[in-house]
Amino acid sequence: MSEGTTEQDLRAWVVRACAELGLEPLEAGAQAAILDLARDVAHNVARPGAPVTAFLLGVAVGRGADLHETQARLVAMTENA
């Protein structure tokens, strides 16, 4: 998060973004899983890969993949990058 941004600010943004897109609020732990994945990709692969990988995770989950299982698979890939 950027300087001055709080966890509450981020949560409020996510709630607003979900409402704007007609999506159900994120399940418990989803936000942390996405942020952890983005951090691992940014640090171990390439910084620009973080949002792209988060998008790919979203596409996979939208097509029926389990969020946490898919996130774990992608994180494992960063360890071998």
Image (cartoon, rainbow, N blue to C red):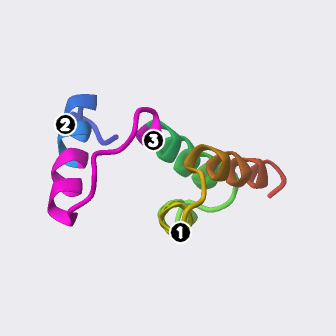
Q: Nearer the viewer, mark 3 or mark 2?
A: 3
Q: Nearer the viewer, mark 1 or mark 3?
A: 1
- Tag 1, which secondary structure? loop
Figure check: 68 above or below 70: above
User: The N terminus is located in which quarter?
Assistant: top left
Q: Quadrant of residue 49?
A: bottom right
Figure check: 6 above or below 43: above
Quickly name the residue at label 2.
9
* Whole-percent x, y for residue 19 in the image: 16, 55
Residue 8 vs residue 1: left or right? Answer: left
Instruction: Indicate which disc, 3 or 2, sits on the residue closer to the N terminus.
Output: 2
Within 10 Å of the Cα at label 2, are there few (<14), some (14-19), or many (20+) other Cα atoms? few
* Whole-percent x, y for residue 80 in the image: 84, 53
Quickly name the residue at label 1.
63
Q: Is residue 72 magenta?
A: no
Figure check: 62 above or below 66: below
Span of residues in magenta: 14-31
Report the amino acid beneath label 3. Answer: Ala
* Whole-percent x, y for residue 75 in the image: 69, 48
Quickly name the residue at label 3.
30
Q: Is residue 25 magenta?
A: yes
